[in-house]
Amino acid sequence: MDMHADLILVEHDKDGVDLAFRADVLCGLSEQQKAIPARWFYDLTGSELFEEITRLPEYYPTRVETELLETHGTEIARRVGPNRAVVEFGSGSSVKTPLLLREINPAAYLPIDISGTFLRQSCHELAVKFPDLPIIPVEADFMRAVELPASVRDLGMLGFFPGSTIGNMVPHTAVDLLRSMRHTLGDGSQLLIGVDRAKDLGRLIAAYDDSQGVTARFNLNLIDRINRELDADIPRERFRHVVRWNDDWSRIEMHLEAVEDLAFVVAGRDFFMRQGETIHTENSHKYTPNQARLLLQAGGWTPSWQWTDAAQNFLIVLADASEFRSAP
Ligand code: AVI
């Protein structure tokens, strides 16, 4: 296997505290509307809980997107063409990534992830399934443009961003990311991206507030992580998982709501919360197909084809890197 690794970007203090995590939590808890970026959900327990979420009957996105890749794999392969380098933004899913790779017969596979641990693990699993495919892990923050190794620069590129993770970003951040992807992948590249569709509210709320309480545990696990890693004493049992639809932003929001007035300490700093006050922990934007295409256009991508399911739950869009033009 051809290995390439950029320098790791995560900084820790002498006690092993992730400095970016501490900064985000202290800053987020000091705001009027308390908020912590959703990326901090994914410690080991959070990642396991997310895997569990993807198997829940109410959580349709993973299932539907996988079915779309299965059903339309041949057509996706025809539109993409062979011998591309597949650049996945994230460590890769154990199901969806092999499905795509098997169909399109690429020249190389490059997953980009900030977490070296997840990256190495998923590359190892893929190398077993695809022994002849050059797999080149890139340890980097894909929210910024990433310089890909020289060995693949002459290949046509296909970016792959499944899972509707784009929906976890507010639109201006989503557009910034799409532009970074455009820079990373270069002229002549393509992007295959999964987007969750706007739909019936009952269906959406159920997907984020499941009957087995797995999503609630996923949300509350953030408190456990803060307590464990940032020397904090937030009383987890005094919080409840809350899911709201924000119509102005067309998004599901997850919050942690204080069930009574609370005081706690995080990394030596005192915080207070009133009963009913919340910590906003996640946004999951839902797009109509037109909105999704507009978002891609704004990010430097011209949609060329799209696939959706009969129930219109989920959308996979294939787009070409737009030519740079200044007018009108
Ligand atoms: C990772 N992301 C696309 C998931 C979503 O649906 O927004 C995260 C998630 N949060 C709660 N359930 C799933």
Image (cartoon, grey):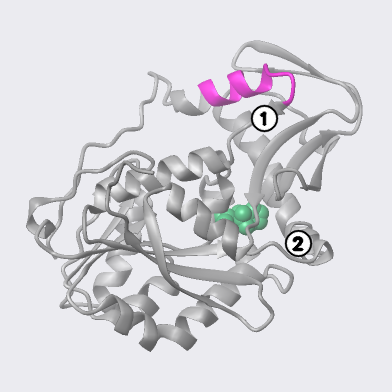
Q: Closer to the camera, 120 or 31?
A: 31
Query: In the picture, residue 131 is in which quadrant?
Result: bottom left
Label 2 lies in ligand 1 vicinity (Cβ under 8 Å): no
For label 2, the crowd category at 10 Å Cα-Cα, with few meaning under 14, some 14 to 19 and many 20 or more, is many
Magenta stretch, residue numbers: 23-33
Viewer-closest of 207 and 68: 68
The reply, left or right, for residue 133 in relation to residue 248 is left
Name the quarter showing ligand 1. Answer: bottom right
Would you name the residue on which mark 2 appears?
204
Dot 1: element: strand
Look at discs 1 and 2 and give the one toward the viewer.
Answer: 2
Identify the residue shown where x is 70% and y is 44%.
Answer: 249
Quadrant (top left/top right/bottom left/bottom right) for the N terminus: bottom left
- Can the viewer see residue 143 in this picture? yes
Query: Which residue occupies 28% across, 80% down?
Result: 104
How many residues crowd around disc 1 within 10 Å: few (fewer than 14), some, or many (20 or more)? many
Q: Which of marks 1 and 2 is nearer the N terminus?
A: 1
- Residue receiving disc 1: 35
Q: What element carries label 2?
A: helix
Magenta span contains residue 29: yes
Q: Position of residue 34 (x, y in %)?
A: 71, 26
Where is residue 8? Give x, y as percent.
27, 37
**In the image, residue 127 lies at what x, y percent?**
24, 71
Residue at 84 percent across and 64 percent down: it is 202
For the stretch drawn in magenta, what is the main secondary structure?
Answer: helix
Q: Is residue 219 magenta?
A: no
The circle drawn on residue 141 is none
Q: What residue type is labelled 1?
A: Ala
Foreground: 106 or 7?
106
Given the current orientation, which residue lies at the most extreme top position? 269
Q: Which residue is drawn at 43% across and 66% down?
A: 93
